Image: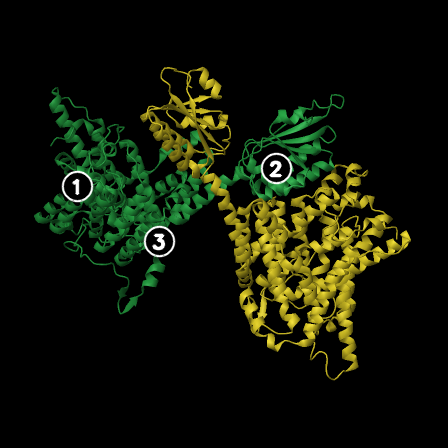
Chain colours: A yellow, B green
Amino acid sequence: MSVDINSISSESEPLTVKSNSNNELKEDPIKCNGYWYTLLSKVLPCLHWMPKYNWKYLQCDVIAGITVGLTVIPQGLAYAQIAGLPVQYGLYTAFMGGFVYCILGTSKDVTLGPTAIMSLLVHEYGNKDPIQAVLLTLLGGCIQLAMGIFRLGFIMRYLSVPVVSGFTSAAAITIGFGQVKHILGVKTTSSEFIPEVIETFRNIPQANVWDILVGLSCIALLLLLKLANRTTTVYATDRKWQCIAKRFMWLVSTGRNAIIVISAAAIAFAIHSQHIKSCRVPDCLTLTGNITKGLPPFKPPEFTEKVGNTTVSTGTLVSRIGVGLAVVPLMGFLESIAIGKAFARKSDYNLDINQEMIAIGVANIFSSFVSSYTITGSFSRTAINYQSNVKTPAGGVFTGFLVILGLALLTQTFYFIPKAALAAVIISAVIFMIDFATIRRLWQVNKIDLIPLAVTFLVCFWEIPYGIIAGVVLSLLLLLYPVSFPRIQVTTVSSIADVHDNKQCLVVLVHSGLDYPSAEFVYNKVNKEASANHGVVSSVILDFQHVSNFDYTVAQMMEELSEDLKRMDMQLIVISAYDYVRNILVRVAEPGSIEFYKDLDEARSVGRL
Amino acid sequence: MSVDINSISSESEPLTVKSNSNNELKEDPIKCNGYWYTLLSKVLPCLHWMPKYNWKYLQCDVIAGITVGLTVIPQGLAYAQIAGLPVQYGLYTAFMGGFVYCILGTSKDVTLGPTAIMSLLVHEYGNKDPIQAVLLTLLGGCIQLAMGIFRLGFIMRYLSVPVVSGFTSAAAITIGFGQVKHILGVKTTSSEFIPEVIETFRNIPQANVWDILVGLSCIALLLLLKLANRTTTVYATDRKWQCIAKRFMWLVSTGRNAIIVISAAAIAFAIHSQHIKSCRVPDCLTLTGNITKGLPPFKPPEFTEKVGNTTVSTGTLVSRIGVGLAVVPLMGFLESIAIGKAFARKSDYNLDINQEMIAIGVANIFSSFVSSYTITGSFSRTAINYQSNVKTPAGGVFTGFLVILGLALLTQTFYFIPKAALAAVIISAVIFMIDFATIRRLWQVNKIDLIPLAVTFLVCFWEIPYGIIAGVVLSLLLLLYPVSFPRIQVTTVSSIADVHDNKQCLVVLVHSGLDYPSAEFVYNKVNKEASANHGVVSSVILDFQHVSNFDYTVAQMMEELSEDLKRMDMQLIVISAYDYVRNILVRVAEPGSIEFYKDLDEARSVGRL
């Protein structure tokens, strides 16, 4: 294994290693390219790196792929629990993404699969019904594909940082608290946040000591292993041993989910085979239990569902998914593209956002053929992939094969995985998703941005889409505030045109664009200032140097303003206007009612100041 | 009658006459004022003019009030037809507004009462049910009052000129076409626009020749009389006779609605009393028919309704009104305040918008006690009031008394008014509401503003509130476009810092504020320009002189941008930033990653350019 051990840094250390694989490819265009090849490689980005693929790349990709695979298997089992689906669906969701993304993806690091937030959304819109969840995968994938083809990626920009941060934090708390019942070993019936919290607390007296014991110790160990990598000081004097020790710690830390889940299952199995009387598994420890064996069949998703004797139609299924058809694809994008961009920046390559949308869409469409719920980019696994020094998107293929292997051979052993251990995997992952950093920064930097954050955060506990919509709408309203009340600065300038008269000019500097919501405000403000200086001021000069937006409503207001000023024996003058603004004004206003000059000096030179 | 005849201009001539009544009041504050009086006069604006009221004012107000009254009686009967209510409700709606506005209003010209657009809205939300319509008046009035008290008048500014224009034109066509069936003398069952048009056309074979005859000749006469005033050339040589002829034409033109309706009713009565065999009224000519006699009772509106044996609860009634509770008060305001502002400008006085909202709200609340549907300012009658040289809001009191007189004495004679004549009154009024002028102007000035106009116009035929909402949302989206894609200008400036190096600087001038939707666009743009000049450019200078808005998302983008540039060996420099923008950036960015200078010269002086 020729992997450069120094290039593997911990998850928490600043990731300064630069993979130059993509850079190389950029600088050295493929030799075998003709016109058609170039065209084809736009649709299939894999054609960029495949001709250059070599033995060294393969080694790196295999190692990274397997490392990610060891993470996705326990995560998949756990996330299926969040999605309210049988645990095997977590693994069904974990392999197809890597295969498709290998061909269509533009980032070497991004790994598609089940994620905590998407699982939460699938829980909300999948109604804990595998058929509905898989249909959502297909339809959401089609929507993502269409958005990619029609280049609608720009919609994402209306999700501001505070809204995304508020949503992520709320999702983390919802997900985390949703697992507390598994740690306690109690059952709840509610699926909404507040009732579930109440019910969970009310059920504490029925808590299972063994579940609590397993759950808490798993959480403690997971956090310890996460920290281990960061804090390890290696006392070995030999540089080689130091490196090996460092790498071992990294492996243990990265593979901690697998280690903990396997250990917990092994202990459960051991207790079970000993037939210890005081604690008969599975009576006292809640286990995952029997799950469907083997690989999912490869077949199109079902469009109707049989419940007892009646058939639920496609229309009914789709209407049950409802607004999920918008929320799920959009949030899927958002997660995946945010991650892709972050790692593209680290590795210094460009991410084609619209191609990414196509890749995720197609990945979801194919995934729906293997009974997967909706997939998207996973932050934790993408980080592991990157740190494992992955070279190309082919890493995902090896991850996929490992998951398939697990499904084919290991499904029976999943019986012994304690539910509390899976809950521990989730909890120890999501507590770091609560975004204190952004809240602290906004507090220091721009407190007004905390409002959409807080609103998104709070409303998300009620309904996630409402939370996001509320945040977006509120952000847009905050955007409207300066549009409605533009900053205006009024100064008085002595007129030198007529020294005897000692007349003055009012100079009104508008600091931003003027759009129709600001018309009345500006009109009132200028009118008020002019009235206050009635008799003293001979002209009102509007300095439009910052006014790049303008519309008919504002132009009409200006025309009315010029009439009002004329009644007070004042002339309305506009200086430093963009041509575009001036053209509108000239066409709307009566000829001569508004005078235009390049700047104050020009107005002065013609005796207007 | 000491009215200055010259001050009466036609509706279509530019109204240049200046009433100085309010100016006088402004310049000569009431003598009897103490602290309490001043305070009280803020709540009751009538206290401003009442102490100064004199015999001359009274003469003017009586004449104006009666002139308006002669217009509102036929209009009221006709508009009730639009509102889908028995005709007497049009008169119930016509008197209380004047009494209340006299005490609370701040414009001498505005006359409250039934209007075509409000009648259309009442038709939509009143369900042709008087009880529901009157309840809507009360609730709408309470909402208007609350909005006035809480000073929410600013909401109006989000209705841009194109949206209002689109709505008005669509309403005019809807109202106008809704009357075609009365002209044809056919009945239709649909209340929606498109089906009604189809049904009306389908029913043409059943059209009543007498109704068509009356309707068309009424329309022709009304238009002729409207034009008469404009085109009359008086051949009288004597100046006095010229004046009298002019005044007579003005009176005939202004009172045309009353003249036509009375004439049509008289003819119908004549035919009826002659018992002409071939045309027995009311068999062949559709008449208004029997209506409830006398004045409406003064009593609180009913909150429940008896339909057969069942009682419809308040909740059900309110839920039937639904979104009308928002649309009706808002559109009421919009109409009234637009009119008030236009005439305040003509007469050179100030309109207190929030006090106006209170006045309209209270007027509606009181009106609901006399079975009125929702009232608002009427453009046509306000113009007549203004042209009749009204001096104070007391004119409305005389209008009110005339309407009450009509209700008390004339209700029986209304039996003979042909429905086609009322339809003619409406049609000849609304055809001038189709706003070709704004469309033409927008086409010349700012074609993009035609989009919200067209959308509002078209969607209003489906549902008026949807049309307005669509227009407002689209206008806001158009507002978002420059926010999302700010104008950016990139120039290259030779660096003089190092002559041997011959390095250059990229100067990026941002023409408007930067808000979160623009972050990605700016990031991509600058990054692309920088990459294109890799190796040639040593620093990227962002000129922020026009950037007055800024938020955390943009600051974070700038931080990422500075990292990207550093990787290309470029320094990010910001010049001419507002302090506010600079403070945010300093807190978000790594120390030293962004350099700040006052302007290009300062950057040059420290060797950065």
Name the quadrant containing residue A496: top left
Provide residue B75's location: percent of width, then percent of height.
22, 44
The 10 Å Cα crowd at callout 2, few under 14, some 14 to 19, many 20 or more, is many
In the displayed structure, A440 sits above or below A34; it is: below
Q: On the image, numbered disc 1 is attached to which residue?
A: B70
In the displayed structure, A433 sits above or below B100; it is: below
Residue B175 appears in view: no
Query: Which residue occupies the foreground of this view, A521 or B302?
Result: A521
Asked if disc 1 and disc 2 are in contact, CB closer than 8 Å, the reply is no
Query: Tag 1's secondary structure?
Result: helix
Label 3 marks a residue whose chain is B
Identity, as a three-letter code, of the amino acid under mark 3: Leu
Asked if disc 3 and disc 2 are in contact, CB closer than 8 Å, the reply is no
Provide residue A96's location: percent of width, then percent of height.
72, 57
**Residue B325, numbered label:** 3
In the displayed structure, A218 sits above or below B392; it is: below
**Residue B522, numbered label:** 2
Label 1 marks a residue whose chain is B
Identity, as a three-letter code, of the amino acid under mark 2: Val
